[in-house]
Image (tube, rainbow, N blue to C red):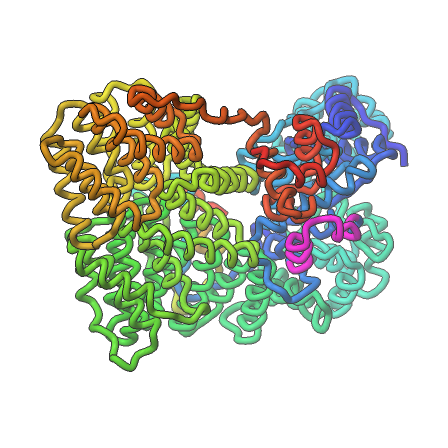
């Protein structure tokens, strides 16, 4: 059918530009926005008609389909699903699970988002793609999330993605940061042409003018209102109906037509309005049970309100649906939903059946609740967390027993949290708490509430709620209570504080000697974290070491495993920390769990900064940063950025000020929240205090603002040294005393070394002896940069004491380490000292400034490890085409032509 | 579900209001909603602009929404 558009030149030009850009590989998304009936769908049809040389994919949001996860996305991608083998395997697997083709669980919903982007990208690589999403405001949440993710990442792809949304129903498109094309009413000339095209009856000029004014040029309104007018009204002899909002005008016109049909056709149309599958068999089957036989479909079709084609039935416009459905009584709607549920019995469409049953229910019904429970479970497996939450909420609403209802609300709350909707989690959990007196369920609900609180609002309040959870569980399940108390104590050890909360350590008795190892580890961690909080280092060190050395089941609570790793921060046990976080990273990579990968990378990097594995730390932080950016995890970005800024500052890198500025801007835009707040702020102050050329007083001003004891200890040497240089001896002495108490209590070699170095900085006759003692302890610690700094300090001291020959040994060792670290400013200082000691220091091998961008360096590094482009893409959560793009840049910059040459390079180009 | 799909419930449901309510309306809401058969409790959280409605017998959500809207408050979907 040829579409003749009237008065749409501006919109058609915009769509043409979009298609041309996609043809040229400059993909973009566009949002058409306007009131119902204004002609968005017709514009989409027009764009499709002009895209004969493109692969066209289409889908549509359906209001009643909201609880069916990925339903709309599945329809869109169906024609290109054959390309699944071209995208990274974890993404392909996740996509199959999301579409319900397998019963596997989607490990991480980001994988479905990436699979969507990459399938479109691959399809576009062969032939440009036009993807069209009509009525996007009604997309199910999971489809909307995947498509918005894709829409923001089309740069460089041969893909055009067009959404149409109603301006009064935005769904997930409230503030979509996509280019928007507002579609308004048509002008007079176009309106006349439209009426001539579609109505074909004479309309008096003053009536035409009034129609145009009433409908504000809305094409559907114009046509339908005109069609509904009597001959007298059209000629102007009788006044037009009362002025109503355009939606109501059109709905009323449709409704008048509907009411003029035989009862059986009305029944069928009402069934079609309540149906969301569009399957003729379902609609006809359900209508049949309501007494509307085969002739009903013909009559409905003849009315023009419905079209039937190829086994599908389509209502003329969404306003037909809302008009007919809205006019039915609620008991009639229930009958219709019951009939649709009946028609779907025994079909694979069990999710739809469950929701029709729920709509038909006039009170609690076990069969309905069971069907909703199953639908929720399926949605959860598919990664449709919003849909799972909706199904569990609806099941709860139809559950009479308050305890069972609270259990379902708990499931709804947990799914909302997985969907990233903490305020919904909060509501469901609070509603459930009102229903249940089951102590353990209450504890689970409080844990969820606490998690929402500390992640989105107040760490202190979150801590109080977790304490309450532990106290609630304690009488019935001490083991569970102990894990919760341990969690509370861990939060307290990272700065959470409430005077009105009980001491977590006092909430549960110790486990029986025969209790499983996991219980003992929870108790040891609880004891350790509590001791950290009160500065009782001997107890803390003893308990934490004991916890680390107790083997537990790999399948034990993730809370235990995560906190074992986190506890290493308190003692600065670098080797163990790296081992535990690397294990976490391997598991997270195996599960393709993006958030856990990010977590393990950033935590692991922290210890590598301490040990001087700065290349690895940078690489891990960069990977975490790319992952955050690729997946839109904006709230996590400051942590890896702070690590990059710090490494640059420690190195004396010329980029350090730029990285610090970038960090500070990001901290303003996305302030860190929850338990990482103190860490990120501390690292940022440390980096600020180590900027080149800063006066000691200014540097001290930054270093004094590090609040979190963990970061204070990591930065101890810088803090003490800066205080001395700023002439603030009393501050240096106070900090040194803090560190000495820690060193004494924990016997950590790095801390003992730092204490001796600190004492040397304060001067006196013992300087040399103190530095030599520091070096003895350094030999037992993996913190290489700190060791080199003690060597440098010793060399400086000896040189100033005119013992130039003695000075050279430690200075040479220090220089070697600083050069290996790429610590430019310290290496320069060591070199100058060596020269002053009479040795002609060779100029260090100039570090070849790499020309590669961070993403290119990541890609090059992984290709050198032997990974294929597809595997690199999976690892970095990008598309294989993006990897290919970066790799070609790497080749060009390095003057090579193949991955074999890249692998053969003697040094890492990054 | 569509906006007007039947939605009978028992137990507590949370309704989010489009805008914060005034003190006067907050005082009127519990009586207006409590008058519906089956409702046993209605609590208004003015700060959070939410309404927690508890039913012991099945109640149609649309009836609750209509009662709220009669007092001039709009309920979010």
Q: Residue furthest bottom?
A: A514
Determine if residue A233 is in view. Answer: no
Q: Nearer the viewer, residue A191 or A174?
A: A174
- The rendered magenta stretch, by its main secondary structure, is classed as helix
Determine if residue B61 is in view. Answer: yes
> Which of the image's four quarters has the C terminus of chain A?
top right
Q: Is residue A28 left or right of residue B47?
A: right
Instruction: Give the answer, above or below, for where A628 lies relative to A383.
Output: above
Q: Is residue A823 left or right of residue A199?
A: left
In the picture, residue B19 is in which quadrant? top left
- Give residue A345's position: percent from left, percent from top: 70, 72
In the picture, residue A662 is in which quadrant? top left
Q: Which residues are the magenta region?
A: A80-97
- Give residue A808's position: percent from left, percent from top: 31, 29
Q: Residue at x 58, y 36 (%)?
A: A907
> Which of the image's four quarters has the N terminus of chain A?
top right
Q: Nearer the viewer, residue A192 or A543?
A: A543
Instruction: Give the answer, above or below, for where A676 lies relative to A746.
Output: above
Q: Residue at x 47, y 40 (%)?
A: A621
Magenta run includes residue A117? no
Magenta run includes residue A96? yes
């Amino acid at each position: 059918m040829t579409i003749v558009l009237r008065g749409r030149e501006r919109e058609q030009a915009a769509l043409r530009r979009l298609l041309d850009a996609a043809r040229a590989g400059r993909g973009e998304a566009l949002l058409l926005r306007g009131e119902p009936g204004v002609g968005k769908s017709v514009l989409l049809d027009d764009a499709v008609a002009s895209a004969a040389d493109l692969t066209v994919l289409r889908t549509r949001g359906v209001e009643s389909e909201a609880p069916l996860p990925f339903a709309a996305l599945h329809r869109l991608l169906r024609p290109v699903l054959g390309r699944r083998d071209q995208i990274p395997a974890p993404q392909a697997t996740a996509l199959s699970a999301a579409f319900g083709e397998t019963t596997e669980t989607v490990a991480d919903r980001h994988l479905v988002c990436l699979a969507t982007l990459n399938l479109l990208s691959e399809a576009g690589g062969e032939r440009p793609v036009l993807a069209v999403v009509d009525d996007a405001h009604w997309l199910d949440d999971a489809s909307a999330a995947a498509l918005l993710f894709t829409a923001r990442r089309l740069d460089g792809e041969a893909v055009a993605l067009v959404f149409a949304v109603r301006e009064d129903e935005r769904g997930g498109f409230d503030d979509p940061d996509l280019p928007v094309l507002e579609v308004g009413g048509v002008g007079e000339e176009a309106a006349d042409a439209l009426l001539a095209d579609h109505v074909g009856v004479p309309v008096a000029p003053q009536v035409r003018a009034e129609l145009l004014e009433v409908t504000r040029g809305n094409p559907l309104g114009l046509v339908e209102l005109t069609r509904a007018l009597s001959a007298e009204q059209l000629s102007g002899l009788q006044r037009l109906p009362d002025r109503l909002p355009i939606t109501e005008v059109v709905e009323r016109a449709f409704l008048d037509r509907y009411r003029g049909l035989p009862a059986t056709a009305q029944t069928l149309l009402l069934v079609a309005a309540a149906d969301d599958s569009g399957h003729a068999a379902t609609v006809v089957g359900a209508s049949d049970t309501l007494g509307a036989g085969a002739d009903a479909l013909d009559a409905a079709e003849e009315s023009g309100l419905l079209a039937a084609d190829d086994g599908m039935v389509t209502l003329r416009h969404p306003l037909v649906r809302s008009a007919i459905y809205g006019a039915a009584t609620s008991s009639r709607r229930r009958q219709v939903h019951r009939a649709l549920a009946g028609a779907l019995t025994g079909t694979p469409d069990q999710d739809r059946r469950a929701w029709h049953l729920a709509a038909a229910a006039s009170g609690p019904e076990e069969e309905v609740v069971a069907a909703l429970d199953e639908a929720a479970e399926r949605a959860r497996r598919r990664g449709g967390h919003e849909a799972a939450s909706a199904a569990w909420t609806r099941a709860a609403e139809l559950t009479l027993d308050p305890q069972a209802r609270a259990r379902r609300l708990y499931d709804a709350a947990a799914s909302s949290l997985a969907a990233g909707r903490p305020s919904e989690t909060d509501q469901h959990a609070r509603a459930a708490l009102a229903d249940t007196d089951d102590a353990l369920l209450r504890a689970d609900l409080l844990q969820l509430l606490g998690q929402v609180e500390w992640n989105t609002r107040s760490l202190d309040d979150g801590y109080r709620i977790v304490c309450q959870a532990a106290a609630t569980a304690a009488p019935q399940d001490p083991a569970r209570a102990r894990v919760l108390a341990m969690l509370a104590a861990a939060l307290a050890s990272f700065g959470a504080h409430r005077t009105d909360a009980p001491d977590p350590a006092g909430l549960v008795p110790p486990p029986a000697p025969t209790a499983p190892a996991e219980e003992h580890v929870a108790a040891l961690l609880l004891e350790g974290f509590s001791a950290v909080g009160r500065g009782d280092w001997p107890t803390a060190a003893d308990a934490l070491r004991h916890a680390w050395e107790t083997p537990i089941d790999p399948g034990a609570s993730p809370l235990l495993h995560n906190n074992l790793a986190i506890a290493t921060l308190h003692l600065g046990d670098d080797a163990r920390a790296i081992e535990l976080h690397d294990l976490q990273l391997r598991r997270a990579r195996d599960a393709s769990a993006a958030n856990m990968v990010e977590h393990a990378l950033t935590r692991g990097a922290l210890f590598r900064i301490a040990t001087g594995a700065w290349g690895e730390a940078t690489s891990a932080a960069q990977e975490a940063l790319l992952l955050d950016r690729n997946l839109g995890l904006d709230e996590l970005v400051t942590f890896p950025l702070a690590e990059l800024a710090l490494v640059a500052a420690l190195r004396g890198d010329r980029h350090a000020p730029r990285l610090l500025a970038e960090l500070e801007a990001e901290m303003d835009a996305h302030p860190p929240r929850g338990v990482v707040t103190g860490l990120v702020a501390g690292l940022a102050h440390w980096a600020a205090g180590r900027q080149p050329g800063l006066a000691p007083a200014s540097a001290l001003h930054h270093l004094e603002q590090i609040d979190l004891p963990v970061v204070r200890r990591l930065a101890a040497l810088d803090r003490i040294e800066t205080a001395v240089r700023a002439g603030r001896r009393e501050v240096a002495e106070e900090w040194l005393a803090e560190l000495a108490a820690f060193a004494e209590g924990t016997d950590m070699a790095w801390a003992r070394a730092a204490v001796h170095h600190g004492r040397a900085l304060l001067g006196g006759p013992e300087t040399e002896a103190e530095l030599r003692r520091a070096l003895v302890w350094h030999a037992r610690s993996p913190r290489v940069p700190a060791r080199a700094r003690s060597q440098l300090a010793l060399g400086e001291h000896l040189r100033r004491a005119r013992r130039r020959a003695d000075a050279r040994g430690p200075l040479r060792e220090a220089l070697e380490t600083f050069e290996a670290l790429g610590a430019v400013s310290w290496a320069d200082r060591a070199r100058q000292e060596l020269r002053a000691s009479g040795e002609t220091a060779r100029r260090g091998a100039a570090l070849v400034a790499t020309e590669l961008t961070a993403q290119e360096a990541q890609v090059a590094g992984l290709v050198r490890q032997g990974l294929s482009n597809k595997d690199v893409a999976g690892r970095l959560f990008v598309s294989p085409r993006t990897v290919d793009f970066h790799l070609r840049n790497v080749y060009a910059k390095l003057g090579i032509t193949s991955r074999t040459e890249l692998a053969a390079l003697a040094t890492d180009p990054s | 579900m569509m906006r007007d799909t039947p939605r009978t419930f028992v137990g507590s449901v949370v309704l989010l209001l489009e805008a914060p309510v005034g003190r006067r309306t907050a005082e009127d809401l519990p009586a207006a909603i409590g008058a519906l058969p089956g409702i046993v409790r209605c609590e208004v959280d003015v700060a959070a602009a939410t309404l927690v409605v508890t039913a012991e017998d099945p109640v149609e959500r649309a009836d609750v929404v209509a009662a709220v809207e009669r007092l001039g408050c709009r309920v979010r979907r």
